Image (cartoon, rainbow, N blue to C red):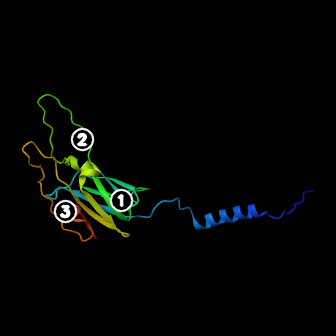
Amino acid sequence: MLSFVRRPMHGAHVAVFLSLAALVSLGCNDGKLKTYPATGKVVFPDGSPVKVGTIECKSIEHGVQATAEIGLDGTFSLTTYKQGDGAVAGNHKCVVVQFIQIDNPANYKPSTIGVVNNKYNSYSTSGLSFRIEPQRNELLIQVDGVREKSGTSNHGTSNHASQPDHLPESSASEVQNRR
């Protein structure tokens, strides 16, 4: 015959039990910051889309990065933790990176049409920044094309975007947060 003896819980056991119960009731917040949807488009000054590449941004306040592949129409949707979840709120620095294979066969000059200027592939030289608000964010990022030997860009050289009121003067000419 089986018999069950009920033992009183000791203080340490009670504390562990209550801690586990609290964690289960609160859910698992594994230290991830809340993200907000952030989509947009990367364009050249003439409005034509950047058709290939990656956009990456880094939160200035938290150091958390978000990335996105640029689609053929220039659009992107930032991802921080899971596909398309957006970016954390706050100010961000931004880069646009393209990996374009250039072979150098004899007498071959590769096209630079659609190629983003190399200054945009480094946080220290891109000059791109924007602010993610705790809401749905729509971004317009304008970049210059590669400069050809004649000193002109294949997509123009000026940056014409309206000045959003929440960006510093140096970056607002290239990134616009469309609400």
Q: Secondary structure at mark 3?
A: loop
Q: Give the side of residue 179 with respect to residue 114, left or right.
A: right
Q: Secondary structure at mark 1?
A: loop
User: Residue at coordinates 36% horizontally, 65% vertically from top-left?
Assistant: 90
Residue on which the image places disc 2: 100
Q: Going by the picture, which residue comes out furthest to the top?
A: 106
Q: CA distance from mark 2 to mark 3?
A: 26 Å
- Residue 65, position in %: x, y? 38, 55
For label 2, the crowd category at 10 Å Cα-Cα, with few meaning under 14, some 14 to 19 and many 20 or more, is few
Q: Quadrant of residue 157?
A: bottom left
Nearer to us in this view, 151 or 55: 151
Q: Give the side of residue 143 with respect to residue 60, left or right.
A: left
Q: CA distance from mark 1 to mark 2?
A: 29 Å
- Residue 22, position in %: x, y? 63, 66
Q: Quadrant of residue 104?
A: top left
Residue type highlighted by circle 2 = Ile
Residue on which the image places disc 1: 60
Q: Is residue 73 visible?
A: no
User: Residue at coordinates 41% horizontally, 59% vertically from top-left?
Assistant: 62
User: Residue at coordinates 84% horizontally, 62% vertically from top-left?
Assistant: 7
Q: Give the side of residue 113 with respect to residue 37, left or right.
A: left
Nearer to us in this view, 171 or 49: 171
Give the vertical position of 96 relative to 33 (above or below). Answer: above
Q: Secondary structure at mark 2?
A: loop
Question: Which label was assigned to residue 152?
Answer: none
The quarter of the picture where the C terminus appears is bottom left
Mark 3 or mark 1, earlier in chain: 1
User: Residue at coordinates 25% horizontally, 59% vertically from top-left?
Assistant: 41
Q: CA distance from mark 3 to mark 1?
A: 19 Å
Residue on which the image places disc 3: 173
